[in-house]
Image (cartoon, grey):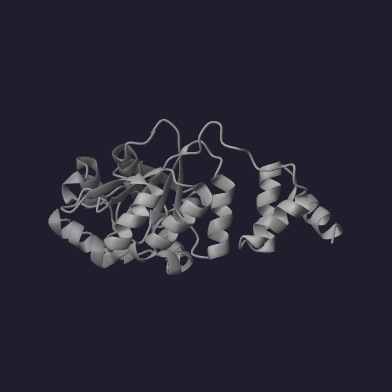
């Protein structure tokens, strides 16, 4: 009989935020699959949990996923944890869940803290409808293209960002989305927790003078209800050329225009190339 995979939410900072059920689950399983075993070992030591650890991380997820699946099929119960928060949220945990589902292995979840929900309620912005974007691509053209795609979304927007990329991302948000209300949340639940609220321009000014430290969650106001829709008075070719002129590569520009207009990507490509 197969074992069961337990997706276990762990603290995003303060170790006391772990649930009783999470601790009991971590104590009872046969194996714990962790994003960083050294990081997770500190959590296990704090709660005197003595269960074997195996690493499961982005660059080895295929190889390690097969190993974990084999253990589950041998009847072992396995807990999946990330460095912080819920596994599967902007980490490779989703691939392991998908692998288990494909092989009929039982999966259950032990809910826990998640950084983006904590930041959302701290931001002071609307929490009734929101869009979690996670980490934007590091490629400049891809990042700008994605921001173009969501700039008319009226939902509150949430991003994860590393400190050394924060200023560049804020600058890109300012250029594409405009100077909206925003909040930068760092070190959530930790000793130096901080929430900086203002406009995107004000956050840029603040972090230009105060070097960003710690992992960030950016919460940005959604587009106003009367935000101007994409300019469909332009032809498809003109709209694509406009995106390319602003730094978007041709492939991404074609995809963006297709999504905005609700057209098949092939049809947009053919129209663009046919007009050359």
**Quarter location, residue 246:** bottom right
Q: Nearer the viewer, residue 211 or 153?
A: 211
Q: Nearer the viewer, residue 134 or 52?
A: 134
Tell me what residue is drawn at x 53 percent, y 64 percent: 140
x, y percent for residue 58: 43, 65
The reply, left or right, for residue 126 in relation to residue 232 is left
Q: Nearer the viewer, residue 96 or 150?
A: 150
Q: Is residue 37 visible?
A: yes
Q: Say which quadrant the C terminus sits in.
A: bottom right
x, y percent for residue 54: 32, 65
x, y percent for residue 147: 54, 51
Tell me what residue is drawn at x 42 percent, y 50 percent: 159
Q: How many marks?
A: 0
The reply, left or right, for residue 154 in relation to residue 187 is right
**Quarter location, residue 22:** top left
Q: Is residue 81 visible?
A: no
Tell me what residue is drawn at x 75 percent, y 53 percent: 238
The reply, left or right, for residue 14 in relation to residue 249 is left
Is 214 drawn above or below residue 107 in the view shown? below
Tell me what residue is drawn at x 20 percent, y 45 percent: 17
x, y percent for residue 124: 32, 36
Q: Nearer the viewer, residue 36 or 128?
A: 128
């Amino acid at each position: 009989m197969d074992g069961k995979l337990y997706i276990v939410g762990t603290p995003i900072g303060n170790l006391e935020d772990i649930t009783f059920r999470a601790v009991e689950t971590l104590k009872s399983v046969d194996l714990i699959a962790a994003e960083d075993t050294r990081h997770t070992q500190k959590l296990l030591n704090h709660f005197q949990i003595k269960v074997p650890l195996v690493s499961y991380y982005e660059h080895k997820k295929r190889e390690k996923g097969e190993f974990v699946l084999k253990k589950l099929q041998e009847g072992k119960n396995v807990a999946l944890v990330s460095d912080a928060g819920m596994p599967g949220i902007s980490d490779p945990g989703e691939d392991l869940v998908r692998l288990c589902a494909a092989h009929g292995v039982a999966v259950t979840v032990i809910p826990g803290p998640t950084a983006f929900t904590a930041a959302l309620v701290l931001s002071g912005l609307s929490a009734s409808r929101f869009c979690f974007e996670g980490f934007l691509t590091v490629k400049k053209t891809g990042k700008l293209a994605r921001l173009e795609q969501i700039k008319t979304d009226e939902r509150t927007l949430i991003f994860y960002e590393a400190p050394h990329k924060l200023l560049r991302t804020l600058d890109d948000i300012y250029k594409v989305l405009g100077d909206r209300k925003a909040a930068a949340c760092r070190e959530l639940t930790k000793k130096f927790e901080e929430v900086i609220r203002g406009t995107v321009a004000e956050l840029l000014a603040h972090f230009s003078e105060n070097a960003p430290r710690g992992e960030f969650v950016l919460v940005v106001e959604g587009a106003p209800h009367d935000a101007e829709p994409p300019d469909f008075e332009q032809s498809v070719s003109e709209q694509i050329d406009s995106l390319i002129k602003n730094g978007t590569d041709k492939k991404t520009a074609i995809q963006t225009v297709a999504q905005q207009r609700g057209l098949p990507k092939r049809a947009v490509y053919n129209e663009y190339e046919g007009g050359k």
